[in-house]
Amino acid sequence: MSHSGQPAVGWASPTPGSERLLAPDLARGVMLLLIALAHSRMLHAGGNLLTRPAGGGWVDVGVQWLLTSFVDGRAAPLFGLLFGYGLVQMTRRQTGPGGDPANARRLLRRRGLWLIVFGVAHVVLLYSGDVIGSYGVFALLFAAAVTWSNRRLWWVFGVTLAFGVAAATALQLLAAAEASLAVGPTLLDSAALRASALIVLPIAGLSVAPAILIGIWAGRMRLLEQPARYRSVLIRVVLIGFPVGIVGAQPVALQAVGLWSPDSVGAGALAEAVFAATGIAGGLAYMAAIALVADRLDQRRGPVTNALVACGRRSMTFYIAQSPVWFVATEPSLLDLGGRLGAATAAAVALGTWVVTVIIAAALERWGRRGPAEALLRRLTYGAGPSTTRPAAA
């Protein structure tokens, strides 16, 4: 991996805001909408089981099909792709002329350790489906992946993809027997149930590896930094990725709307495996499409684009900020709406939640304030120093 032409860095420092790219931040802003929509299933009867129909009228059925086909299992890979891309950017900044590759790996591992801490706190306090800790596990175990050869990168990708598909399939089959949300009669009971989910954190860390590894490959290619150069590649990814992701989702989506039911456990498991395996194609297509849009926008950014970018720059803050909504809505001792709304109404709650976070992010950008989660993570990762007052890559 070449590091030529990178700025000299003698002290570990985050990326200045003036050097941030439009495409990754725009993608993170859009990604948060997809994540919110994916989480909205906690509010309708489908719950944790992707194949369970939520019922309701034709609007609810249509919304459930759309979300299962375009969002479920497709939004999370986009998150992983962008995380992997960010690892390359961080490493490249640390390993320019005068930089230290070993120090870059230490930096990634330290950041990964703190991400695990953030993720554990997020799970116990608010939401059992956290992914922050999973990415922390990956960074802690595979900090050197950024400098692996392409052959090794793709070999590990294949192994972890097989593992991730098997894990996702197994979890859905288990959810078929127990699809209840991780909530108890009291807030303390719910916290204990969420904490019990932490036992699968190492498995989750390996399951997110395929998307992160492709994100690392994309970062090496500078796909988001040079979209004009790779325009034809990005277009092909969109034209292939979306159909693969959508068609691969249909064995599950058709079950979710009650149009098909597998006649054996094996057929059901195969449907889940196909759904999981094709999710990365959908995530890649989203990333490529947003990169193409960003290339067209570039210097013609309007207030909506700026607000989305502001949200993307604070993606961890506003990913966590969505969780209080699901917490309050699903806790039996609070609103107790888990499984009680139609799919369309649940999606509207998700959309409204995301819009509010975008508005708050835009206000923080105008005021020159970082997201509190990003600010804390940077300080813990980089330590106190002159660069801790500058915006940095999430």
Image: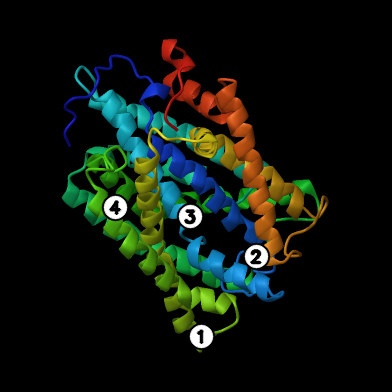
Pointer 4 with pointer 3, Cβ within 8 A = no
Q: For the residue labelled by badge 1, is the local secondary structure a helix, a strand or a loop?
A: loop
Distance from Cα at disc 1 to Cα at disc 3? 25 Å
Q: Is residue 157 left or right of residue 200?
A: left
Where is residue 287? Give x, y as percent: 38, 50
Q: Say which residue appears at 75% left-offset and 52% top-offset.
A: 329
Q: Is residue 353 left or right of residue 278?
A: right
Distance from Cα at disc 3 to Cα at disc 2? 17 Å
Which residue matches tag 1? 262
Task: Kindly indicate the quadrant of the structure image that contains residue 267.
Answer: bottom left
Q: Which amino acid lies under the numbered mark 3 shown in the image of this protein? A: Ala
Distance from Cα at disc 2 to Cα at disc 1? 19 Å
Which residue matches tag 3? 75
Task: Kindly indicate the quadrant of the structure image that contains residue 275.
Answer: bottom left
Which residue matches tag 2? 47
Q: Which amino acid lies under the numbered mark 2 shown in the image of this protein? A: Gly
